[in-house]
Image (cartoon, rainbow, N blue to C red):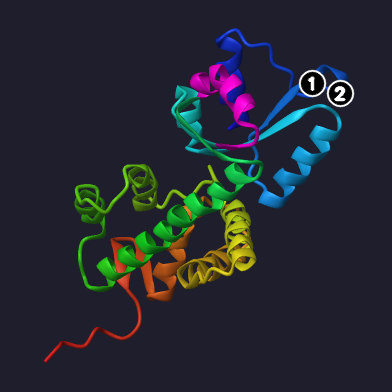
């Protein structure tokens, strides 16, 4: 993600320092990493002690969106500094939002990720139900992509899953990190998150398999738990046959 963002900034004429040990040069720092809100607030405090304004700006979007400058940014920190950084934001993002004081951007990220992470678990369950009920697995994408409940960003993930391609773009171990941020925030503010907890459990089970996989590999986990498997002729149902309803 960092490489395409840096490339766009350089191509737009910005001077870019990837790492600088001379702290006297910095007046404003835009941090784009996903960390705990408390970490963002501590960095802001440390920056203020040294005369540096720190903005916590979190990212929503894929590597492809970063290459095209179509990211979504959510920022926290000093409003004047945020407004002053708009020329940077316009290069890398299609939308950017100021959310409030330090830590606000870092707080919004797990809120947004809750929908994405639980959503993938829901897709995995729907796919397993589709196959267990005897429907054509390869028609699943055609149907879901035309429904109002299916996000356009999920189409590519499901296309790859239909081909059993789970090569890591965003590995499942990083999904576990995101779940940690989500559940930590929920515990801190006293919010119950039963769906997120259940999704994290399934995600962790698949991650325990040891292979470095794309986070959509939770589809594999749900297929295994539904006793579905491949043969040379395609997908079959494993285990006891489904009883007829009477």
Which element carries disc 1, helix, strand or loop?
Answer: loop
Residue 204 vertical placement versus 105 (above, below): below
Residue 130 x, y percent position in the rendering: 26, 66
Q: Residue at x 60, y 30 (%)?
A: 79
Relative placement, left or right, of 15 versus 209 is right
Magenta stretch holds residue 233: no
| Residue at x 66% of width, y 41% of height | 102
Is mark 1 in CB contact (under 8 Å) with mark 2? Answer: yes
In the image as oriented, which residue stretches furthest toward the bottom? 246
Residue 77: image quadrant is: top right
How many numbered circles are shown?
Answer: 2
Please say if 116 is above or below 58.
below
Residue 26 image label: 1
Q: Residues within 10 Å of mark 1 (few under 14, many from 20)?
A: some
| SS label for mark 2 | helix
Residue beneath disc 2: 23
102 to 226, vertically: above or below: above
- Asked if residue 83 is among those painted magenta in the image, a careful observer would answer yes
Q: Position of residue 200 (x, y in %)?
A: 54, 66
- Considering every residue shown, the one lying at the far left of the view is 246
| Spot occupied by residue 151 in the image (x, y as percentages of width and height) | 32, 47
Q: Is residue 60 left or right of residue 135?
A: right
Q: Where does the N terminus fall, quadrant-wise?
A: top right
Magenta span main SS: helix
* Residue 17, picture quadrant: top right
Q: Magenta residues?
A: 75-92
């Amino acid at each position: 993600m960092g490489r395409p963002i840096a490339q766009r900034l350089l191509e737009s004429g910005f001077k870019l320092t990837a790492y600088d040990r001379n702290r006297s040069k910095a007046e404003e720092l835009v941090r784009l990493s996903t960390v705990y809100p408390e970490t963002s607030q501590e960095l802001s405090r440390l920056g203020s002690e040294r005369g540096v304004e720190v903005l916590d700006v979190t990212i929503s979007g894929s590597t492809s969106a970063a290459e095209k400058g179509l990211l979504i940014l959510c920022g926290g920190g000093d409003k004047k500094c945020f407004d002053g950084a708009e020329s940077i934001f316009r290069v890398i993002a299609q939308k950017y939002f100021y959310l409030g004081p330090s830590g606000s951007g870092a707080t919004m990220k797990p809120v947004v990720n809750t929908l994405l992470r639980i959503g993938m678990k829901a897709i995995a369950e729907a796919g397993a139900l589709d196959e267990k009920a005897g429907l054509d697995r390869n028609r699943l994408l055609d149907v879901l992509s035309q429904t109002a409940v299916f996000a356009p960003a999920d189409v590519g993930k499901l296309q790859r899953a239909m081909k059993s391609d789970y090569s890591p773009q965003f590995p499942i171990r990083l999904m576990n990190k995101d779940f940690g941020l989500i559940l930590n925030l929920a515990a801190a503010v006293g919010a119950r998150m039963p769906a997120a907890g259940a999704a994290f459990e399934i995600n962790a089970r698949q991650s325990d398999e040891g292979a470095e996989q794309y986070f959509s590999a939770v589809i594999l986990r749900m297929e295994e738990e539904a006793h579905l498997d491949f043969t040379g002729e395609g997908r079959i149902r494993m285990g006891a046959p489904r009883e007829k309803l009477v």
